[in-house]
Image: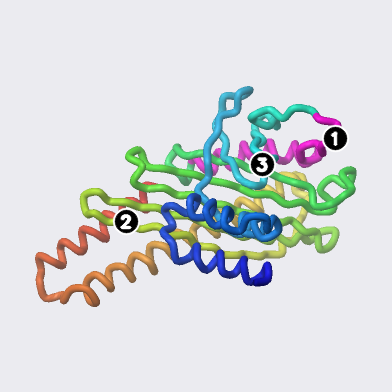
Amino acid sequence: MSDEDKLDSSLSLLRRLDPRVIESNLTNICTLLGSDDSVVEELLSSVDVPLKIQTCKQSGKDYLCCDYNRDADSYRSPWSNKYYPEIEDNDEELPPPYPSSILRQLEIKANDSFDIYRDLYYEGSGVSSVYLWDTSENEDSGLDDGFAGVVLFKKETSDSLGKWDSNHVFEVIPESEHRILYKLTTSVILDLNSNEMNLSLSGNLIRQLETSQLVELNNGINLETQHLINLGQLIEKSEYNIRNLLQDVYFDKLKDIMLKDLRSIGDIKEKKYEDSKQSELIKGLNSV
């Protein structure tokens, strides 16, 4: 079996297994693949798993862990720019990746900006993190050659019955002196449970957006701020679209299955019970 067939089979299997235990399933499949490092690496980069939270020892703030801020078993904090657990210096190994100094300054501003976004759109709770990296080998080029990054959000309800993880991976590509292309890939992992109704709904969605923006810097706004405004608007639009898709398509379809396919609509008591099931799930979505 070729590497491509192994990857396709692994992804197909993961789509059919319980999404609530995707991390365990992914680990087991990687174990079965064994020494096929290239397939394992491609699989890990293709599958989204729920984000993990760590605390920055220097700042005391929480941050989210993903492949984009990981080096071996350590994760870089966007607040202190340090890896935890700390990485020991070894002349024989490559140093862990860091953004260039100019990009690091933008990363600090981006974390502050999207922390405000999180506070507004996630009802003051949850955790957000932003990580940026250079796409040009010339670190002295600043932002002129473009860059890439990821914006992460994680929210759980107080009773842990509703969980929302969103990953926004983007690329900023200059097309001309005053025009920038923004490419965004958004993936959302949703996990809702209702103990009262004995219901569970889990899954993930992936959507892409792309826009070309004219950048005008003669109105007192610098390039860094313009990038943050454009990315913020694009991410806001993507999250809004996915949230509406989850509620309008998935929950309406769930109601159709319950009321039409599984049970006739004639029994009013049954209809009220099925409506309460849907309301319970929608309440869980609204709380995250």
Give residue 280's position: percent from left, percent from top: 26, 54
Residue 86, above or below 158: above
Q: Is residue 221 visible?
A: no
Disc 3 and disc 1: Cα gap in Å?
19 Å
Q: Amino acid at mark 3?
A: Arg
Q: Amino acid at mark 1?
A: Glu
* Among numbered discs 3 and 1, the one appearing first in the sequence: 3
* Among numbered discs 2 and 1, the one appearing first in the sequence: 1
Q: Give the secondary structure at mark 2.
A: strand
Residue at the image position 68 percent from the left and 58 percent from the top: 36
Q: Is residue 108 magenta?
A: yes
Q: Residues within 10 Å of mark 2 (few under 14, many from 20)?
A: some
Q: Residues within 10 Å of mark 1 (few under 14, many from 20)?
A: few
Q: Is residue 113 magenta?
A: yes
Can you tell which quarter of the image residue 265 is in? Answer: bottom left
Q: Which mark is residue 255?
A: none
* Among numbered discs 2 and 3, the one appearing first in the sequence: 3
The residue carrying mark 1 is: 92
Q: Which quarter shows the N terminus?
A: bottom right
Can you tell which quarter of the image residue 281 is in? Answer: bottom left
Give residue 69's position: percent from left, percent from top: 67, 42
Give residue 86's position: percent from left, percent from top: 68, 27
The residue carrying mark 3 is: 70
What range of the chain is rendered magenta?
A: 90-119
Residue at the image position 20 percent from the left and 64 percent from the top: 274
Q: Main secondary structure of the magenta part?
A: helix
Q: Residues within 10 Å of mark 3 (few under 14, many from 20)?
A: some
Q: Give the secondary structure at mark 3.
A: strand
Residue at the image position 64 percent from the left and 56 percent from the top: 40
The residue carrying mark 2 is: 200
